[in-house]
Image: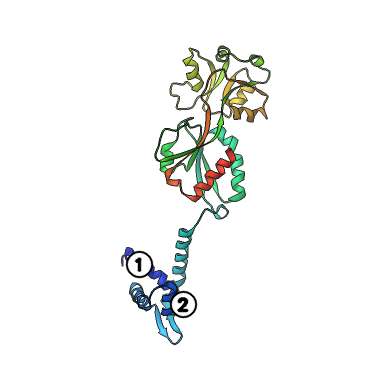
Amino acid sequence: MNDYDIDLNLLTVFEVLLAERSVTRAARRLGVTQPAMSNSLRRLRKLLDDPVFVRTSEGMSPTPRALTIGPQIIAALKGVRESINASGFDPTRSAAHFAVGTLDYLEALYLPALLKQIAGSGPDIQLRVQRLPTLFEVPQPALESGTLDCAIGLFPQPMTPQSSLHSRVLAHDDWVCVARRGHSAFRRRLSLQEYAALRHVAIIYPEANTGAGMVDRYLSAQGLTRNCPLALGHFMTAPFHVAQTDCVTTVPRRVADYFRRILPLQVAEVPIALPPINVGLVWHERVEGDSAHRWLRAMIKEVVQ
């Protein structure tokens, strides 16, 4: 017998007959005529190569074969109905695993609160966090393949139209210059020339193949260069370096606010028009309607905002 030849409606007939032990009552319960129910029973017997139900003085009695397979069929039908009728995602009963891409500083700022939020409602849910390889580029291949379920990053807005991607801006930020507390250059408002002349800890992500970071590109447009004795591929250690030297670094304001609570730092406005920061959430069309992923995105939105 070919598995694809099985009429799944016959399994429902079997389930009702097992419960009712009567062709008449089973027909009434399923809303069909008695001849139609009798025909379904004949087909069921042929499918299972067994009488399945036999007429006795007490009604239709199941055969040993029917009693053996009955619990399995009932459990299978229950599972199908629960899957079809599920109205949403229950985090308290889920052990889902989610893969989230993000940047090092966004991970430090938001992941502790996100983990706390998730643990309170979905104790068996797990997150796998993957570092985004670039600063501003949407990781479309990873989202398309399912390597990532969503990504939180500094994605340009409006995004380049991508029919397969969805996005939402979660927060806005801007850039500031950070130095150790008492740095002589911060006694007054920095001019553009003074800012460029300082020793910088640069943040240069891999997409800058020339070795120049975003700040370098904007300074170059003004005919200026900066001295960078140290270049890093991430944000989170830069404040430690500048807290102990005369170097400065340019980071998102939220990074500066975070580290000012634990390090002797001061902040100045950047005297150059750097692009605003949009902290965005991006996901693929394949998970747009999935209730578990909608729940995760709602958690992320609540934490970031």
Badge 2 marks a residue whose secondary structure is helix
Q: Amino acid at mark 1?
A: Asp
Question: Can residue 297 be seen from the camera position used here?
Answer: yes
What is the x, y in percent for residue 27?
Answer: 41, 76
Q: Nearer the viewer, residue 130 or 45?
A: 45
Compute the Cα span from label 2 to label 1. 21 Å
Q: Amino acid at mark 2?
A: Glu
What is the x, y in percent for residue 214?
Answer: 49, 22
**For the N terminus, which image quadrant?**
bottom left
What is the x, y in percent for residue 181?
Answer: 67, 20
Of the numbered discs 2 and 1, the one sitting upstream in the chain is: 1
Identify the residue at horizontal 44%, vertical 40% (top origin): 143
Disc 2 target residue: 20
Q: Taking 101 as reference, is 72 above or below it? A: below
Disc 1 target residue: 7
Q: Taking 260 as reference, is 247 above or below it? A: above
What is the x, y in percent for residue 116?
Answer: 62, 44
